[in-house]
């Protein structure tokens, strides 16, 4: 009991909980406001508690100054890891936003009280579907497992490489757009062909006023073929989960 309540053990638990709490605030599906803050706080402690005996030997001399500096470092590490994770899964919502733009649904925006921002129809729907698939398939457990490994690759007394972080953020943004196009690509191609057909029809028969049918036709095609894009989401989320874990491992060395 004395070993469990020793100063190095409590300090390691505090610093590890700070990193996990910062990560939970940024990483999907835990960053949603639908999860109460008290639950996130308890979950951060639950993540750090089994690792505490091994982390106790990683701390420098325990002083007020070193604890403050280490706390700030753990916040930076947790936020960076959470941002990279959210950047990877943002591709799903970006794919929904592309469908809204090309399908004519971008005009129908609504205020989302969870994200405190306006969101379009398919963008919000794809985000909720991604969160549901992560929870149902157990993908969140794989992401959490990858996060717990960062305590080994980047100890509590380790230093985060800002150069590696900048490279991963740059590459993550490129992967975000590529993944979004891969998910929404079939629907965008169909909608582009519909625009092309309407343009040819307006040239062949101007009296039909084909462009007045543009919005109804594109909305009908988007709703009819939405299942094509939704069908690829499980495989896409599986690949995104693996990508998120690998990015966390690369960031922590």
Image (cartoon, helix red, strand yellow):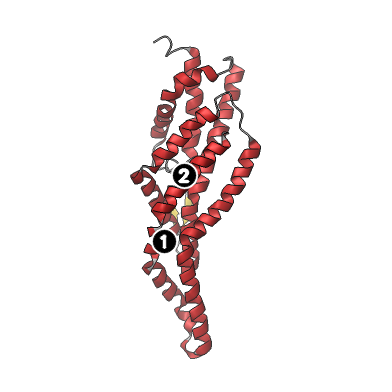
Q: Is residue 105 left or right of residue 154?
A: left
Q: Which mark is residue 162?
A: none
Spatial CA span between label 1 and label 2: 20 Å
Q: Quadrant of residue 84?
A: top right
- Foreground residue, 47 or 125? 47
Please tell me whether residue 132 is drawn above or below residue 161 in the rendered image: below
Please tell me whether residue 79 is drawn above or below residue 239 in the rendered image: above
Q: Position of residue 230 (x, y in %)?
A: 39, 59
- Foreground residue, 119 or 153? 153
Please tell me whether residue 144 is drawn above or below residue 237 in the rendered image: above
Q: Position of residue 244 (x, y in %)?
A: 49, 43
Quadrant where the image shows the N terminus: top left
Q: Earlier in the sequence, mark 1 or mark 2?
A: 1
Q: Residue at x 46, y 71 (%)?
A: 190
Query: In the image as oriented, which residue stretches furthest toward the right?
Result: 163
- Foreground residue, 214 or 234? 234
Contact between labelled residues 2 and 1, with CB atoms less than 8 Å apart: no
Please tell me whether residue 202 is drawn above or below residue 98 in the rendered image: below
Query: In the image as oriented, which residue stretches furthest toward the top?
Result: 2
Q: Nearer the viewer, mark 1 or mark 2?
A: 2
Q: Residue at x 55, y 56 (%)?
A: 177
**Residue 106 seen in this snapshot:** no
- Foreground residue, 188 or 124? 188
Element type where label 1 sits in the image: helix
Quadrant where the image shows the C terminus: top right
Q: Position of residue 74 (x, y in %)?
A: 55, 29
Q: Position of residue 162 (x, y in %)?
A: 64, 36
Element type where label 2 sits in the image: helix
Q: Which mark is residue 242?
A: 2
Q: Residue at x 51, y 89 (%)?
A: 204
Q: Which mark is residue 229?
A: 1
Callout count: 2
């Amino acid at each position: 009991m004395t070993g469990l309540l020793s100063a190095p053990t409590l300090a390691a638990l505090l610093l590890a909980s700070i990193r996990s709490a910062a990560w939970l605030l940024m990483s999907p599906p835990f960053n949603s406001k639908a999860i109460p803050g008290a639950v996130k706080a308890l979950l951060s402690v639950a993540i750090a508690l089994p690792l505490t005996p091994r982390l106790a030997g990683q701390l420098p001399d325990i002083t007020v100054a070193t604890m403050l500096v280490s706390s700030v470092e753990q916040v930076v590490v947790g936020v960076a890891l959470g941002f990279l994770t959210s950047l990877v899964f943002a591709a799903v919502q970006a794919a929904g936003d592309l469908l809204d733009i090309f399908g004519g649904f971008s005009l129908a925006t609504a205020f989302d009280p969870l994200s405190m921002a306006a969101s379009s129809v398919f963008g919000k729907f794809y985000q909720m579907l991604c969160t549901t698939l992560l929870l149902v398939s157990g993908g969140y457990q794989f992401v959490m497992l990858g996060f717990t490994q960062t305590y080994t690759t980047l100890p509590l007394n380790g230093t985060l490489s800002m150069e590696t972080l900048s490279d991963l953020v740059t590459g993550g943004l490129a992967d975000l757009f590529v993944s979004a196009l891969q998910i929404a690509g079939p629907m965008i191609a169909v909608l582009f062909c519909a625009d092309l057909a309407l343009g040819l029809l307006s040239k062949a028969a101007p009296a039909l006023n084909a462009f007045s049918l543009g919005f109804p036709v594109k909305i009908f095609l988007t709703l009819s073929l939405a299942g094509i894009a939704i069908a690829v989401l499980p495989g896409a989320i599986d690949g995104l989960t693996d990508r998120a874990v690998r990015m966390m491992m690369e960031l922590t060395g």
